Image (cartoon, rainbow, N blue to C red):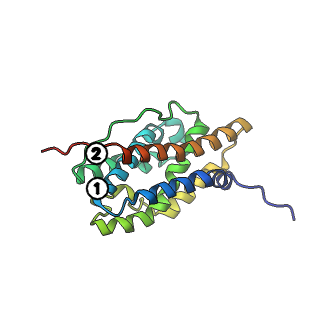
Amino acid sequence: MPQEPIRRSQRLNQITHAAHEQLDKAVKANAPFDTLASYTRFLSAQYLFQQELKALYSDPQLVELIADLPERCRAEQAKADLADLGAKIPTAIAGAALAPSQAEALGWLFVSEGSKLGAAFLIKRAAALNLSETFGARHLGEPVGGRAEGWKRFIRILDDLPFSDEQEREIDKAAVAAFERFNVLLRHAYTTAPEAEPA
């Protein structure tokens, strides 16, 4: 029997595997759920990443492909989480993806949407810090309609798009770049001095 061709989402999982593992190790090394101070730094990185992708979630051409894309954005939840913890909104860091092509944008969104599956484990850890979907860890909360279902819908659309060879290369490169970018933001969050708390 001929082997089924590998789907785009499967290929993206394979080519981002090393970058994903590297990021997982970096997150674990910073122990974001050991203390509230450490979690706040992790949250700052999450906020910056979501903020950088905010324009993609409301891009009209992308919304045409994925109707519920604007509701999937977590930038506002991350901002509300920072407010819950009395933390300052972090300043944007140079190096965000500017004006990506449609295929590149979908590579970034693939990583952002995929991270919602991992967030199911993270929110359980956050509970030990007295954080929840309504306080301090909103951005890790269960999306409307459920995590698995939302991911499956996204993947079905992504896998069925007709792409040129050039677009395939673009989406691959962008998905790896998204993991690397989060790593940069994470490193920045944990190496810079925390913003002075208001007196």
Q: Is residue 143 above or below residue 108?
A: below
Q: Residue at x 59, y 38 (%)?
A: 104
Say the numbered circle drawn on residue 37.
1
Viewer-proximal residue among 165 and 160: 165
Q: Residue at x 57, y 59 (%)?
A: 152
Instruction: Name, please, the residue furthest toward the right.
Output: 1
Mark 1: secondary structure: helix
Percent of width and height locating residue 37: 28, 55
Percent of width and height locating residue 132: 31, 64
Identify residue type, mark 2: Pro
Q: Quadrant of the C terminus?
A: top left
Identify residue type, mark 1: Ala
* Count of residue discs: 2
Say the numbered circle drawn on residue 27.
none
Q: Residue at x 37, y 45 (%)?
A: 191
Task: Provide the residue designation for mark 2.
Answer: 194
Q: Earlier in the sequence, mark 2 or mark 1?
A: 1
Can residue 47 be seen here? The reply is no
Can residue 107 be seen here? The reply is yes
Percent of width and height locating residue 66: 53, 46
The reply, left or right, for residue 174 in relation to residue 198 is right
Label 1 neighbour load within 10 Å: few <14, some 14-19, many 20+: some
Badge 2 vs badge 1, beta-carbon distance below 8 Å: yes
